[in-house]
Image (spheres, grey):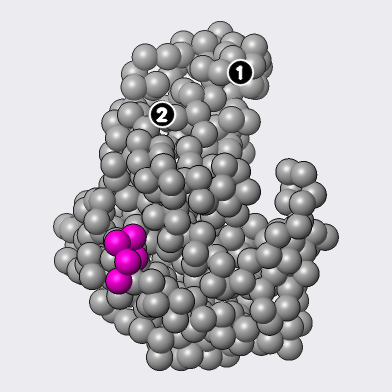
Amino acid sequence: MASNFQFQVLHTDGAARLGKLITPHAEIETPVFMPVGTAGTVKALTQGQLEELDVRIFLANTYHLYLRPGDELIREQGGLHRFMAWPRALLTDSGGFQVFSMSDLREITEEGVRFRSHYDGSTHFFSPERSIEVQMNLGADIIMCFDECTPFPCSREHARQSMLMTVRWAERCKNHFEQRFLEPQGAEQSLFGIIQGAVYADLRRECVDRLLTQEFPGYAIGGLSVGEPKGKMFEMVEVTVPLLPPDRPRYMMGMGTPEDLVEGVRRGLDMFDCVMPTRHARNGWLFTHDGHLVIKNEIHKRSEKPIDERCGCFVCRRYSRAYLRHLFHQNEVLSAVLNTYHNVYFYLDTLRRIRQSIASSRFAEFAVQFLSEWRQSGASV
């Protein structure tokens, strides 16, 4: 498996790791933040703008692309890279989280999950094998095992049964992937395992032990950022990460705020994704070095300041808060474009600064300063 996939840790600073991830379509510096492009597009940004921002990899959603336009159509078009004219790396999730989030529209059994489309109510079935088939048709560089994501709160017994089924499903995913690995698209892809266990430390440990026997080229931590307290989320990360192979990338699924990214890197994580920068941008919620800025607020009506005077993106170099507020209140498409560009830049720049601090063995100092400024910023304006 993963013949065209390489990962190397270049430098460590405490638990923080500076690395290089090589896929068939990109060389990616880690730690890395992956913007979310649910339906084969990072909403409000063109592929050219993503390249301008130096996005090396982003996440596309298996569930949504399976429903529309369909994985077979995308395969016929030459795969998702060619379909969307994206030359760099892609990661697809398994569809498991989307199924989890539709509790009133799905039925879970050992064989898989039967669910109804949120578009038209039509019935569909995802087994571990079918999830792999869809992801291989899409052709992403990194694909994920089909897993069951438990809600918060849930009982320990529920979490254990779900974790054990996730492990069994992972074995089925790996077997099916390996059967097709010698096909052209298979040799271009790598399959990651997903660690579940809710907020129970012993279940997380057991899941790691079981998945390590299956030898995946990378491991993701799933089932967090679903409503549990932040302290509990990081506790599970601290339990899990030391058990993972040091020569494999560690991917934290769905985690989120700039503060979370710093805390995650501090604990040894390498890869992150979250809809927050793009979704917040469309709602006029902007990230700055001084905290959150809500562009629709009256205080910005006549402000000639940029979003963030310490930001180097073209939006902050060119446009005033007053103009951006006007666009938002007029519901102009340009509002989403400019806000999204800034937020994605802010996230990517935060990761660039993190990587630089690790390379110079000053990550602890960077983290203290960043988190102090972030937490002191207080309420949004």
Q: Quadrant of residue 364?
A: bottom left
Q: Is residue 362 above or below residue 127?
A: above
Q: Residues within 10 Å of mark 2 (few under 14, many from 20)?
A: some
- Which quadrant: the N terminus? bottom left
The residue wearing badge 2 is: 46
Q: Residue at x 77, y 44 (%)?
A: 120
Give, as a three-letter code, the residue at label 2. Answer: Thr
Estimate the x, y position of residue 273 in percent, counting from the top left: 47, 53
Q: In the image, 233: left or right of 240?
A: right
Q: Is residue 100 magenta?
A: no
Q: In the image, 77: left or right of 217?
A: right
Give, as a three-letter code, the residue at label 1. Answer: Phe
Q: Main secondary structure of the magenta part?
A: loop
Q: Is residue 379 above or below residue 326?
A: below
Mark 2 or 1 closer to N-term? 2
- Which quadrant: the C terminus? top right
Q: Residue at x 63, y 48 (%)?
A: 67
Q: Residue at x 35, y 41 (%)?
A: 82
Q: Is residue 185 magenta?
A: yes
Q: Find numbered disc 1 in the image and state the secondary structure of the residue it sits on.
A: helix
Q: Residues within 10 Å of mark 1 (few under 14, many from 20)?
A: some
Rendered image: mark on residue 328: 1
Dot in front, 2 or 1: 2
Question: Does residue 18 appear in the picture of this structure?
Answer: no
Q: In the image, 270: left or right of 343?
A: left
Q: Residue at x 23, y 59 (%)?
A: 22
Q: Is residue 65 above or below residue 30?
A: above
Along the viewing direction, whichever of 258 and 224 lies nearer the viewer: 224
Q: Find numbered disc 2 in the image and state the secondary structure of the residue it sits on.
A: loop
Report the span colored magenta: 182-186
